[in-house]
Amino acid sequence: DGQRVYALINAHDGGLYRSDDAGRTWALVNADQRVRQRPWYYFQVRADPRDASTVYLLSFHMWRSVDAGVTIRRLDPPHVDNHALWIDPERPTHMIEGNDGGATITLDGGATWSTESNQPTAQIYHVATDDQVPYRVYGAQQDRGTYSIASVTNGGGITAQDWYDVSGGESGYVLPTPGDPDVVYAGSYFGYLTRFDRKTGTSQDISPWPENTEGQGADSVPYRFSWTSPLAFDPHDPHVLYTGAQVLLRTTDQGRSWTAVSPDLTRNDKTKQRLSGGPITLDNVGAEYYDVIYTIAPSPLAKGQIWIGTDDGLIQLTRDGGTTWQNVTPKALPAWAHVELIEASRRDTGTAYAAVNAHMNGDDAPYAFRTRDFGAHWTSITTGLQGAVYFVREDPVRQGLLYAGTERGMFVSFDDGDHWQSLQLNLPVTSMRDLVVHGNDLVLGTHGRGFWILDDIAPLRQARAALADSAVYLFQPTDAMRTPLGGGGGGATAGTNRPSGAFIDFYLKDAPTGAVTLAILDASGAVVDSFGSVPGPLGRTPLRVHAGMNRFVWNLRYAPPPPLRTPGGPVFEAGGPRTATVLPGRYTVRLTADGHTDTRSLTVTLDPRLTATPADLRAQLDLMRKIGDAIANDHRAFNQIASLGQQLTGIGHRLGGDSTLQPVVDSARALNDRADRLAVRFFQYKAKAPKWLFMNYPLQLNGKLVSLGNAVGGADAAPTAQAEAVYKELRTALDQRLADWAAMRRQDVAALNALMQAHGITPVYVPGD
């Protein structure tokens, strides 16, 4: 009905208006405050394309009217804060709705909705990590609360079972206590701050001023807290925690009391602290508070030295714990811009980096600054950056290596910020909000795509311009930990685990013209395993290489046994053979490409959580190597019998039509039957599907050895006495079958070959003989 028009009007007598004459006259049909509570944020009206009397209203909740707006009924998509709605013009019961939790679909007019938990759209404000092994990642997500989530798990990906809530709220900082990650401090708007103790499952409100000031202007409250009030531990005393309002607040007793250790460090412009929302509809939820401390950066080198940045464009510094303060704002810093983060240098007390965001003033240019003299002078460090800057972080290992996140991506600098280049790699294009350098990893919080981790940044720390002129360069690997962590898949909704093993990075200036090989050698110089860019005699997956940077992850294991030669590939009852894991210690990585050879040392350490002794691990290795040798012997024997069987089958096909050669055909057929019965005793190849068919085809020697290897190698521990006993029995059985096979070659195969030669036929050949 082109005559009917709906309009949501923000006015003192506002609400849903309707015109039935194309706008010549209007009537207020619904003044319900629930559909007009936040006009600047929601306030959407959508008419049904097929029914002129059906209309949808988007607000905190979603509403539908079927009587042209007179009455409304609430619909319940899976999240509140509703902003967008698409209605299928052909089938209006099909809708896509967008809210602060994501996108959701209904196919039945809103009776049921699809999940939003399948969308990687988390808006993370800040990121932190703890000091556990493996470390956990912490942050607050817009409209979804706070998280502690595993950085890596024992295979299978990172799923919902690997995270838990740590109290606080959607918009704040989240900080685990140094040395005690079960105690977590988490903030939110209006200065709400909690202390969460995971051991007891309790959360205490430790807000510096726990008065509910919702709806009040910033000029009427004792403390002006930001939507995202900063938190920072004193790096010299983990019992000291700071937060910021218009003054810097400090607690030394886990939040039971707070003390101001500064005057008002902001511009304190009262004209910017009034009630927000205008003369019609007020809107004060804390995000509107201005003239607040926005970042706190205690120096890791000098106790009592603290840098402060405000959301109104100031940088302040104290060097005596807050007794005196100095305004050290860069002259080039735009007035009223957000000082998003300050990074206090780990190398020099006078050096700091400031990330500044002026986009709310209509200025999308990047702003970042560096000082080397306690703020007396600042240098702009934005060459190569794009978009508003949210953080600049210093690498703790390589001097001059910096990381920056902006509205448009991730960047890296190798010259202390003088020049920047992209570090986007496979990151989605979204807002990069905060970063922690944790050991050898970069841990990133994005505002729109959740947490990301860049595993092992050794190449960044070692990169030099001269490397580009090297034909072949092998980077020094970081220590690799022998641990049960990492690897595995995880499914569509799981986070990706880091690969399990040692990261080996190398650079090839040009695409290789010949084979590229990587070899791992132990302390004696013996090859533990090797990998090549062309398929080797064992048929293993080739090493993938290309011009430029290459990364290979060695699984810290010895070389596997030769593969079984069966049609369609072997089917194992419970996975393929598990090879032995190397002992902690020193190894050598050798890279060979186009006539160039480069070597580097590699140290393998042990997961500190594991209690196995060196003697335990040595005993495990010895037994695993014995099992591996037995499996290799088994595979070689089976492959030899399989090769013989193919030749014997071929004899019947080739010679079956000649009656004079029938004795040869009959002897070959009889030998093939005996060989097949022996082959099955080495490996049950007749089972063509995993697991369940072995109930129909009894498991044979190979499967028993593989199963024993999985049992012995499944944990970092000494083998049990019973595992040793089972190995001895299986080894005895293997030796007997190997003897049977040797006898068959000496007697039966030799007899057949003599018969074939007597008839002028080329004899069969057993590989290995």
Image (tube, rainbow, N blue to C red):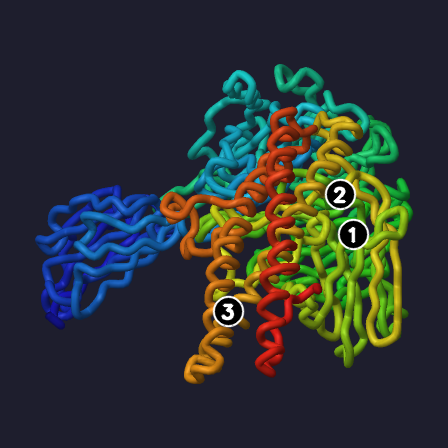
Depicted 692 relative to depicted 168: above or below? below
Whole-number angstrom distance, CA of label 3 to CA of label 2: 45 Å
* 10 Å crowding of disc 1: few (<14), some (14-19), many (20+): some
Provide the residue designation for mark 2.
Answer: 582
Front-most of 293 and 673? 673
Please tell me which residue lies in front, 468 or 188: 468
Q: Residue at x 20, y 44 (%)?
A: 74
Q: Is residue 595 visible?
A: yes
Are the residues at dot 2 and dot 1 in contact (C-beta closer than 8 Å)?
yes
Secondary structure of residue under mark 1: strand
Position of 720 with respect to 39 (left or right) is: right
Residue 542 falls left or right of residue 36: right
Residue receiving disc 1: 528
Where is residue 305, by image quadrant?
A: top right
Dot 3: element: helix
- Residue 739 in the image, given as x and y percentages of width and height: 64, 49
Q: Position of residue 395 (x, y in %)?
A: 80, 49
Sequence-first tag of 2 and 1? 1
Amino acid carrying mark 3 in the image: Ala
Instruction: Name the quadrant containing residue 56.
Output: bottom left
